[in-house]
Amino acid sequence: MKKIIFSIFAISILTLNSSFAQASEYLMPAKKYGKWGFINKNGDWIISSKYEEAYYFSEGLAAVKYFGNWGYIDRMGEWVLQPEYRNAKPFKEGLACAMKYNKWGYIDKKGTWIFEPKLNVVSSFSDGKAIIKNDDGFVFINRDGDRILKHSFERALPFAEGLAFVIYNGYKGYIERNGNWLIKHDYEEAYSFSEGLALIRNGKNYGFINQRGDLVIKAEFEDANYFREGLAAVKKNDKWGYINQKSEFVIEARFDAAFPFSNNFAVVKSGGKFGLINKNGYWIITPNYSGLGRYTRALSLEEQIEKFVKTMYSDWQLKGEFEKTSTYMSRVSEENRGSQIQEISTQAVNSLAKRYVKYDQSAIGLYEADYEKFNVFIPGAKSIMLPVPLEYAKEVKDNWNDVWLGNPTYTLSGDKFLITSLEAKYKGQRFYYDISQDFHTTANPTLDLSFDDITYNIPQMNILRSSHALASSLTLIGQSDVDVDIPVTSTKNKKTFALVIGNEDYSSFQMDLNTDINVDFASIDAKTFKKYLINTLGVPNENITLLINATAGQMKQKIARLSAIAEAYEGEAKLIFYYAGHGLPKEDTNEPYLIPVDVSSSNLDYALKLEDVFSKLTENKSERVTVFLDACFSGGARNQGLVAARGVRIKPKSPYVKGNLIVFSASTEDQTAYPYKEKAHGIFTYYLLKGLQISNGEMSYGELEDFIRTNVMRKSVLVNNKVQSPEVKVSPIFEYSWQDMRFTEEENLSSSG
């Protein structure tokens, strides 16, 4: 609320009439003709489409990407912070995550670094808390940078409604703010609570649990998103719609994609384009955009309230027909302007809250007996901690539908209503809520709590860890940091297809070779890369072919299949080809070859010439073909096995990159592709995965190339005492555009704000 008041204080009366019309527009990021701009609710372009990417407006500013770098603009389209960041996120609670030198930190609205860019993973602040990742794992911090809990976690999500999802010592579940487990579970995936429910994945399907850990909405959906404003987007029979908390479809499943509601509107995709609907499922903005509401909250509450305030203020500052000039000048004095703006702002918030905050849909959650307070979830507002004495607690919870809630007051927190006071009545008893007594919304002291003390009071769900589940969670190789913290996206890239090959075990297929010839970690490289394709880049599992220890026949057959897919999709498909294994140059021609596990290095007639692979992948029209080669072609690979077998080291002739091809190679022609033994990966693949991990798959090709090349060159000298310089080669048609490409540029529309 303060930021709205302060921003309006700065407005001169002389400029009110000229600036109100544009500043009060509802602005949403929209994409058309390959660029992002901002439209109003009528679909008119207010800020022209000239940005490579754009977030929604938050706290008066929007993060946008311009010529490869990120900065922040105001609603007039003017730069407030120049585009000088490698990456950036929206402002929340006065701070924004920003990246420089491939590291994240936090800036304020002046661009001052509050936390220097030294971190690999950060989250936005929420209720004064955030998550960062350091060498120990994920940790919770406050705005001073102090740790809230002393323990580090293998994975963590921010606190929401009093609980945070974590993985600790192999256990998955939700902890309270004091670090104690509330729920332990064995679901494949679980997410933060929203409006009293948390999204989980059980097997292949999604459902919702409550704060007791009970599965209250059956896991029967192909995909789903969290609840907001009483509704959740779910996918059934390959179409998206919206359900309520009774699992009833309120808006039928008819969309290609759907995202959470905000302020009674939601972004959906239909017929390959994005539009905006209301809660009746009617179109507000017809689907005409290739992108809409990037990471959206739809129509901003801040903007709606500001429009209300400015309209009323504009009327107030006009001189009345029967008002003397001296009286008018006294009335609109600077002191009176300030108090009037505060009064109008309060009216605006309370008036709008009546439309959006739904007390009749409220739900009661966890009772924290030490504080004698209930978590109460009210659609349209942040959850509150309602004081209820212990003697009444059970009865109140059992009869929540009979509890009356009223007499609220509000302020605004980010883009959500914050209830500052409230009265509850039940059978003659009155319970009063005051935000100043709500520890969820006030600064928390730094806690130093031990997990050793919690083993006697952990509530257990009625889902036991089976021996099969335990066995499947144990992996002897590949448990480095990139194998266990794989980001998950809601994006679905249905027209991306991949062939992933990991050729490691040559000695089992060629009896005259010993195990020294094998390519250490190639199989785990391929398997983990497939996981990133699915989880982080949104490629459907059925679109990916994984080959481990592939023979010549298998490789040729699957490459031909990938080419046939491109033909069937008539130019709309994106292809990804990944290979980890041996490569060799042919001695008489120096042409590079990929080596199947059943092909001898002394006879390459049955190997795959790299130029032929490129030609096959590009023979049919596709949007683009991206190739990753964790192999070298000089006669050595990771453990130098083929150098010994061949007794040669040749500088291979680089094949011509043509068509629509982009090739990421582990090394230059005469270098070796080395392992990173400490991480149990090829060093090239490790930093490929690391780049995808720390950016949640959002790095551009140029950013990814820079990240891989810089880190591989530095680390290889340190751990292998050898120089390795990854490189990228592109076809001429992509010479000036490849660096800005992204794996998910068309459908990377986040479901969270």
Image (cartoon, rainbow, N blue to C red):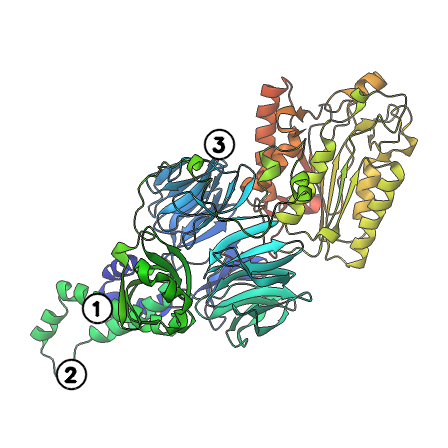
**Closer mark to the observer between disc 1 and disc 3:** 3
Disc with the residue nearer the chain's start (1 vs 3): 3
Disc 3 marks a residue whose amino acid type is Asp
Label 3 element class: loop
C-alpha gap between disc 3 and disc 2: 70 Å
Disc with the residue nearer the chain's start (3 vs 2): 3
Tell me the residue that label 2 is attached to: 321
Q: Nearer the viewer, residue 597 or 668?
A: 597
Q: Is 181 situated left or right of 419 in this image?
A: right
Tell me the residue that label 1 is attached to: 343
Residue at x-position 68% and y-position 39%: 471
- x%, y% of residue 83? 44, 46
Vertically, is 152 above or below 231? Answer: above
- x%, y% of residue 318? 20, 75
Tell me the residue that label 3 is attached to: 136
Q: Nearer the viewer, residue 698 or 399?
A: 399
Residue at x-position 67% and y-position 42%: 467
Q: Nearer the viewer, residue 450 or 677?
A: 450
Label 1 element class: helix
Disc 2 marks a residue whose amino acid type is Glu
Disc 1 marks a residue whose amino acid type is Glu
Which residue is outermost to the left? 326
For label 1, count other residues whose C-alpha is less than 10 Å away and answer few (under 14), some (14-19) or many (20+): few
Snapshot quadrant of residue 77: bottom left
**Closer mark to the observer between disc 2 and disc 1:** 1
Which residue is outermost to the bottom? 322
Snapshot quadrant of residue 143: top left
Q: Is 448 situated left or right of 284 in this image?
A: left
Label 2 element class: loop
Disc with the residue nearer the chain's start (2 vs 1): 2
